[in-house]
Amino acid sequence: MRAVRDLLVAVGEDPDREGLRGTPERLARAYAEMFSGLGQDPARHVETVFDADHQEMVLVRDIPMYSVCEHHLLPFHGVAHVAYIPDRDGRVTGLSKVARLVDGYARRPQVQERLTSQVADALVERLGCQGVLVVVEAEHLCMSMRGVRKPGSSTVTSAVRGSMRSAATRSEAMSLILGGRH
Ligand SMILES: Nc1nc2c(ncn2[C@@H]2O[C@H](COP(=O)(O)OP(=O)(O)OP(=O)(O)O)[C@@H](O)[C@H]2O)c(=O)[nH]1
Ligand SMILES: [Zn+2]
C-alpha cells in the first residue's frame, strides 16, 4: 500500500486528499483479485473429468477474458475460444472448468501469446486431449489509451496441439468458432 501512495506522489497527486485516501487499500484489494491466478495451478480445474464416451470436438466459445499486460500493467480484454478433442477413452471436463482454466491464467501479469499457449498445454497435459485449438481475441488498453493509440484494433492469437493440427479438423473448429457471427 505504501507503493501505491508513492505512485500517487510520483504522478503529482496528493495521496491525502479526500478522494484518494482509501485508494491504496482499494487498489491492493483490486490487484489481489486481478492477480489471483498467481500462486495457484489453474490446470487443476480440468482434472475434473467425466466419462462422456465422446471422442469428437467440444468447443466453448466466446469466454469473456480480462487480463493485464505485463509490460504496462494495463488491461487487455476480449474473448477466448477453446476447442478440444477428448482422450481416446472419451473423457471430458466440465464446461465451467474450461472457463476457470482461462481465468486462472488470465489473472496474472501476462502476454497474450503465453496465455494462449498455457491454456492449450494444460488441456493436453492434464486432460490428455488428443487435440486442442485455443483462439484469443483481445484489445490491449496499452495500445488504445496511450502509446500508439489505436483503439478498436484487436490482436488474435492461436495455439494448436495434436490432432487439431490437421487441416480438416482445424477448419471444422474455426468454422464452429466463427459460426453465428455476422
Ligand atoms: N507480443 C505482445 N506484445 C505485447 C503484449 N502486450 C503488450 N505488448 C507490447 O509490448 C511492447 C513493449 O514495448 P516497449 O518499447 O518496451 O514499451 P513502450 O515504449 O511502452 O512501447 P509502446 O507501447 O509502443 O509505446 C509494446 O509494443 C506493446 O504493444 C502482448 O500480450 N503480446
Ligand atoms: Zn501493454
Image (cartoon, rainbow, N blue to C red):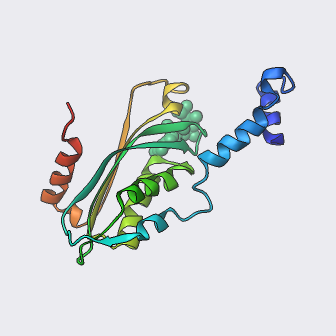
> Vertical placement of 78 versus 94: above or below?
above
Quadrant assignment for the C terminus: top left
Which residue is painted at 58% across and 63% down in the image?
40
Q: Is residue 34 above or below residue 21?
A: below
The quarter of the rendered structure image containing the N terminus is top right
Quarter assignment of residue 27: top right
Is residue 9 among what the camera can see?
A: yes
- Measured as percent of width and height from the top left, residue 137 is found at 36, 41
- Visible in this render: residue 13? no
Judged from this view, the residue extending furthest toward the right is: 16
Q: Residue at x 54, y 37 (%)?
A: 75
Task: Count every numbered label the image shows and give the total.
Answer: 0
Q: Say whether residue 35 is left or right of residue 154.
A: right
* 4 left or right, relative to 90: right
In the foreground, 50 or 111: 50
Foreground of the two, 114 or 136: 136
In percent of width and height, residue 51 lies at 28, 74
124 vs 113: above or below:
below
> Residue, x 35% and y 69% (percent of image)?
124
Is 147 in front, or is 116? 116
Q: Is residue 134 left or right of residue 182?
A: right
Q: Residue at x 48, y 68 (%)?
A: 44
Where residue 173 appears, as percent x and y from the top left, is 20, 53
- In the rendered view, would you say 50 is above or below 157? below
Q: Residue furthest left?
A: 168
Q: Quadrant of ligand 2?
A: top right
Measuring from the top left, give residue 77's x and y in whole percent.
46, 38
